[in-house]
Image (spheres, coloured by chain):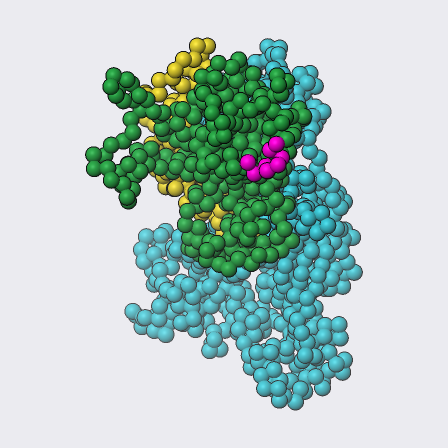
Amino acid sequence: MPDKPKVAFYWCASCGGCEEAVVDLAEDILKVVEAVDIVLWPVAMDFKKADIAARPDKSVAVAFINGAIRTSEQEEWVHMLRRKAQVVVSFGACANSGGIPALANQFKKEDILKFVYEDCPGIDNPQKIRPQTSTVDEGRTLTLPVLHNMVRSLDQVIEVDYYLPGCPPTPKIIMSAVQAILAGKLPARGTVLSPDIALCEECKRKDSKPADLALAEFKRPHQVQIDPEKCLLAQGLVCMGPATRSGCEALCPSGNMPCTGCFGPTSRVKDQGAKFVSSVFSNIVPKEEKDIDAVLDGIPDPIGTFYRYGLSKCILRRKLN
Amino acid sequence: MSFEPKIVAFFCNWCTYTAADLAGVSRLKYAPNVRVIRVMCSGRVDPQFVMDAFAKGADGVLLGGCHPGDCHYAEGNYKTLRRMRMLNRMLKDMGIEDGRFRLEWISGAEGEKVKVTVNDMVAKVRALGPLDMPGKFKEWDKEIEELEAHVNSDAPTEVAHAR
Amino acid sequence: MADNNANKQQPNGLPRIGFYICHCGSNIAGTIDVADVAKYAAGLPGVVVSRDYKYMCSDPGQEMIAQDIREHKLERLVVAACSPNLHEETFRKAAAKGGLNSFFFQMVNIREHASWVHEDKKAATAKAKDLARAAVYRVRFHKALEKQQVPVDPNVLVVGGGIAGIHAALTLANAGKKVTLVERESTIGGHMAAFDKTFPTLDCAACILTPKMSAVKSHPNITLWTYSEVSKVEGYVGNYKVTVKRKPRYVIEDLCVGCMECIDACVFKEPKFADKFNQGLGKRKPVYIDFPQATPKVVMIDPETCIQFKTGKCKKSCAEACDRKAIDFDQKEEVKELQVGAIILATGFKTFDAKKEPHYGYGKYPGVFTALEIERLVNASGPTSGEVVLRDGKHPKAVGIIHCVGSRDEKTNKWCSRVCCMYSLKLAHLIKEHSGAEVYNFYIDIRAAGKAYEEFYDKLLSEGVHFIRGRVAEVTDWAMTPEEEGKLVLRVEDTLAGFVRRVPVDMVVLATGLEPQADAQEVRRRFNIGCGNEGFFQERHPKLAPVNTFTDGIFIAGACQSPKDIPDTVAQAGAAAAEALVLIDAGHVELEPNTSHVVEEECCGCKSCVPLCPYTAITFDEAKKKAVINEVICKGCGVCAAACPSGSIRQNLFEDEEIFSEIEGVLGK
């Protein structure tokens, strides 16, 4: 089948959810499989790196890459895929903006390693052995990838042509992206392949949001009996919907949970967390610093709340230390 | 050479910008480290602007608005205060020291306060030392430069991970 | 003039930018190396013309810009000069003259914000370059904008019925404009109505004021609302909606003819209550009129002292006496709404509370009076019919006038109240004339700057009034010598003679200074204007726009702006009326285009912006489920643009990319 476009899937620092999302296409996946020739998909098929390296440059039509970039191995793979692929699609929140792994950008690498290999309860490592990037065993040098000091989005490492947002991207936006690619009907490079309008647009609770919302208190989902009809922000929950791109059809609010922002911001916004803060906190009730602070105390982890999926794309990129 | 902090200031047109004009008319002398960006109201200042100023190389960011109750637009400064209280927490969590971001209420009649505030902030930021985010970004990205060059060279062989 | 314009080729895509830096004589060029900045700017991307010039704001300067725009096909203009608050409009016009949209222009403030505030020439020049670069980066993103024209309501509101408000109202009314004059007291006239004579001419205040008061009442173009207060102001220049509360006076104004039969008929046979108009020196009944020429000449009932209000059991003889049935014990506060195009604030001043200087014994020694009290005492229609007497009815043989009480004092008010020297001289003359007493003036300096003021001072010197230069330390009744027994002694260092004097007198007059009204802060917030540190209303420019405020369409006149005498007040009131006329006669105003708008297809309808607008310019379109901004109501603060969580609101002239590029510019290399 020489005429079928060649497609690669690759995963970096990710949970596997993006792979699941492809499987979640259900019967639709058969149409995809029929239309393309999958040359790389580590989760499902066995391919060797050398096989990909041996392919001519630009011989792969599309590479879908999910996961953030944390190690030199991931870095190396994505550089190679960039060379081999005509189009690179950043697939899912981790690849787009660091995702959950990027929350590690609040900590030093050394602190993370120390915790994981020494201090974490349940670790039994009296010699404090840490993985080494290079070790000699029976005369052979074995290597492991380097753990980078920070978690990066895919586009902070290689050029990216399109983005599919979401943790993970929903079957609907995956299918429409795949169809667009196969049909050659692609928008301008750099586009996020999901509607460029915020989530409230497609939220069923939209009409229940009062026009004069002024919050005096923030609550976390476990602290309240969530009304299944009413706007979640109006219930004092941090719902990132207004600052988050739509396309998921408001899955979380439909499941009675506030939006946590996995689709990232609209194209007009550089920093999703900053912009959300600018909007929601402008109109909280108190006017005095002390009372304002009392309201803000309802959000004990602002970075984790406002940058749950996007700390790599925060304008400041990581915590300084 | 001693370190000269770069301070980006966002001043509201009606109070703090006017106060800075008054400081000029009154020929008050203050440190030349501040670059003022005029906005109509401190409420126009998006936390993104503050972060962006740091990211582009500011050692400090000063935000000036009308005193509470005195906003030309009724309550813009309260909106500023609220969102900037949260921004302050976020900056702290991101490791930006206290004192690098400052919110001050300076009325159109307080030219003297512009002088005092700027001088004080310059002194404090000078004591904190350079923030130099652009330099830090470069430093951070050094770890991915080497490999990029290697992979993109014409004869990519096995990559030596250990560095 | 350096020329950095060697037929530069424009790289693709960038608009062609002209950069101009002003020397402002030596104001800028003395500190900033303008030629160096011009040379630097010439190298910035997009800049095709870069020049420095002696005075950019001059006609040749503007003409040069206009000509360059045409010749070099400039698409953007940057001028580095003074504050945009001063000359932004000038250069916008210069741009338009050259055929460029006025808003393809950005101004760089290197005078107020650089050359005037820095001494280090190198640092100031570096700063000017940074600011210039920011403007060059920013101006690329500027868009062509048009000022929106909105019609101006031709009606005017004047707040405050003192001489300033009266004069402003009459001027406008005589020019054919409809004016509503709102006064919170029961009569217009203000402080001036309480004065006896006016300095330096000694013409009687009532004689010159009351005809103007009557003219206000009878003028077909003036609606007079006394005993009323403005409670709310909405809208914008040319289109203000004002809410006025008309307090109940318990007398129907349209029915009362001012015959005062009701006052005679009151169950209180004698006046019993302190009379505010006479500074408490006279008495009035619960039903009263402030003074015979009060305008409107309508009585009122004080519910605090009226038996009917206190017990509900009065026989209401006043109401019986009124054959026009004007008395209405059930009258309620009325709330009125007005539409006006301009507002003149002439809310006046209050005098310094003499009790705040306890060492002068006001309130402690009955022989100590304030100047306003003396105004009433020397007034022929005052409580003593012009007789200068002490509170016990005795005639003073010696009177001491202490100048600068609550003025020129670090501990109270730093400013000079401007009128006290002159009114003290006037009162000295009148006291001497009415009582023959010896009069001593205790002064720091005599400030008699004004037409015929110094001559008036000379006249007083020749009349035998004593002048002692020194700030009085205290007023005491503690006698050291038999001559001081029963007297008030002023202890003062005579700074001309060089020793401490003790001057025994019978009466002390405190020349209290002028202060902002107690509620000046609330009032100026209501009208959205500024105050200086001392609390007087802030004019737009101390020299060039003394009656304008930072809020277009709101003007100030009289002592609410700063202490001033009657001639200056009247002049300023006339100026404010003229400014209002300019606005009205133009028929329309051009609104700054720095308003915000929602990009409909980008808006998700989250309503985050709706409650943020203090002017309710943002509404939610229930049919489209989108937010909409009424750009006529929008005042351009940009708070919504900053807050829109999906970046779907743009503020003209302050768009995100304009500000981001400015940030990049000030920090770039």
Closer to the camera, C635 or C191?
C635
Where is residue C560 drawn, in percent x and y? 57, 54
Q: In this view, does A206 lie above or below C254?
A: above
- Please give the name of the residue rendered at 62% of the width and 61% of the height, measured from the top-left corner: C231
Which residue is drawn at the image coordinates 39% and 35% (left, top)? A105
Q: What hue represents chain A?
A: green
Instruction: Identify the image quadrant of residue C519.
Output: bottom right
Part of the protein shown in magenta? A23-30
Determine which quarter of the picture holds residue A85: top right
Q: Is residue C585 left or right of residue B148?
A: right
Is A258 rendered above or below residue C592? below
| Residue A253 in view (yes/no) | yes
Q: Where is residue C20 in the image (x, y as percent from the top left)?
A: 58, 22
Q: Is residue B144 left or right of residue C536?
A: left
Chain drawn yellow, letter?
Answer: B
Q: Residue at x 55, y 53 (%)?
A: A256
Is residue A310 inside the magenta stretch?
no
Question: In terms of depth relative to the viewer, which is nearer, A112 or B125?
Answer: A112
Classify C490 as above or below A277: below
Residue A29 lies within the magenta run: yes
Q: In which quarter of the image is the N terminus of chain A?
A: top right
In the rendered structure, the answer to whether residue C419 lies left or right of residue C294 reads left
Please tell me the colour of chain C. cyan
The image shows residue C196 at horizontal and vertical percentages of 59, 64
Q: Residue furthest left?
A: A127
